[in-house]
Image (tube, rainbow, N blue to C red):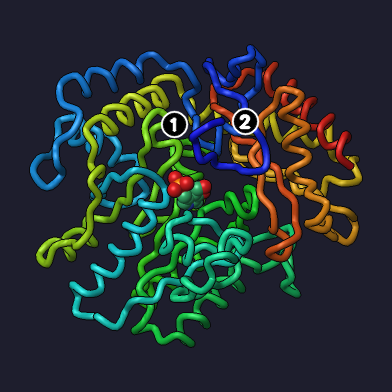
Amino acid sequence: MSNVFPRVLDRDLPLVARGEGAVVWDAEGRRYIDGAGGAIVVGVGHGRTGVVAAMSRQAGRVAYAHPTAFSSEALESYAEELAPLLPMDEPRIYPVSGGSEAVETAIKLARAYHLARGESSRHVVIGRTGSYHGNTLGALDASGREPLRRPYEPWLGRFRHVSAAYEYRCELASHPEGCGAALADALDAAIREEGPDKVAGFIAEPVGGATLGAAVPPDDYWPAVRDVCTRHGVLLIADEVMTGFGRTGAWFGCDHWGLRPDIVTAGKGVSSGYWPLGFAACTGEVFDTVRPAGFVHGFTYSHSAVGAAVARTVLAILKDEHLVEASRDKGELLRKELATALDDHPAVGDVRGLGLMVGVELVRDRATREPFPRAERLTERVVAAAKERGLLLYSSTGCADGTDGDLVMFGPPFVITELQVTEAVQIAAEAIDACV
Ligand code: PLP
């Protein structure tokens, strides 16, 4: 009997043994293409000895020092090297242990900013339906992912939500024209209804991630949303936990539209899985505003020197090996091959994404886009069938209406080879065929 309380309770898990590039092996010697980089985490690939050496060097010098007592050379250097890449002016970076903590930090920072300006009534955060920002209670409340919210609804409800940009299921009369502007108008209306003096921030993923499976917004969306937030003095929080660090073929998802948010959150690809790490970064203007009164917040493991040493090496690898460009180019290849293999498949409704963040939405009827009923557990069966055949995929359910809707996602390491892309597509097609 195991003493582990596992992440999933409906099946036994193999033991992972090792990883190399875009491949992992279990303890029985079975090989899997890591088609999802775990949970769309691993960018630079598995088995990077340089990252391990940096981690070990820093831990050997000093592994832990309390963030209220010390900064570290590793963290100061990392922040300096990262700053020019972030989509904001004079960024200040607050490192934490993962994406959910990054979002909690961002939300509190937005509140701290308004308090420091004497606008103490501003406390409401507006998120989007069809979004995911994490599983801690604040981040979950900002999220619009029904299956994860449902058991905890009695603890949620402080935040409100507007529609995400979800072009595949867009119901606007003018679609596909003017969707971005119309969605921004809806945000404007929600802020007015709430009372602009009550709204602290608007949080959204630049490209819809875990809930909507790489849903790319129309080009008029982000400029219009930025404008609405600026007009109402609402801080714009771009949640780049999934989209950051090259995942969409640009350094940050915001870069595709020249978006300049007030706060950015990151996680996953920051450390490529080598260390539990995330951060919230804010503009110099937000930092300077908050600084005199201080920021009431903090975690034991924030500002980790070892985490910074890891992230610094990951950043260097991304730059030196041109992996952001690799994500862009291999993402195009992946989408092209998926389209060729799956476009005629009766259950494949949409193949979408940017860079190596790619979603495949499965539907019962391509013409009406009717989803499969949840009871059929199609996503789970496809993911299991792919794993059985040696491919790891990321999954999500509920995209269509909060309950029904089946998605599988690709988000492999950027070092995946072209041959492995072809192999992954072939296995995914076989897995879908085996299930519908
Ligand atoms: N924000 C986004 C956009 C995410 O995709 C995720 C995780 O999938 C999170 C936040 C939460 O990150 P974590 O699981 O590291 O807490």
Q: Residues within 10 Å of mark 1 (few under 14, many from 20)?
A: many
Q: Position of residue 39 (x, y in %)?
A: 55, 38
Q: Is residue 347 left or right of residue 49?
A: right
Q: Quadrant of residue 96?
A: top left
SS at mark 1 in the image: loop
Identify the image quadrant of the C terminus. Answer: top right
Kindly identify the residue that appears in the image at 52 percent across and 16 percent down: 18
Q: Position of residue 297 (x, y in %)?
A: 22, 58
Q: Is residue 220 visible?
A: no
Query: What residue does disc 2 label?
Result: 13
Kindly identify the residue that appears in the image at 60 percent across and 40 percent down: 357
Q: Is residue 205 left or right of residue 168?
A: left
Kindly identify the residue that appears in the image at 59 percent across and 16 percent down: 27
CA gap between label 1 and label 2 equals: 19 Å
Compared with residue 142, is residue 358 higher up or lower down, i.e. above or below?
above
Q: Is residue 428 visible?
A: yes
Identify the image quadrant of the N terminus. Answer: top right
- What label sits on residue 11 in the rendered view? none
Sequence-earlier tag: 1 or 2? 2
Q: Quadrant of residue 291?
A: bottom left
Compared with residue 367, is residue 387 higher up or lower down, i.e. above or below?
above
Query: What residue does disc 1 label?
Result: 273
Q: Is mark 2 within 8 Å of ligand 1?
A: no
SS at mark 2 in the image: loop
Kindly identify the amino acid type of the residue bearing the numbered disc 2.
Leu
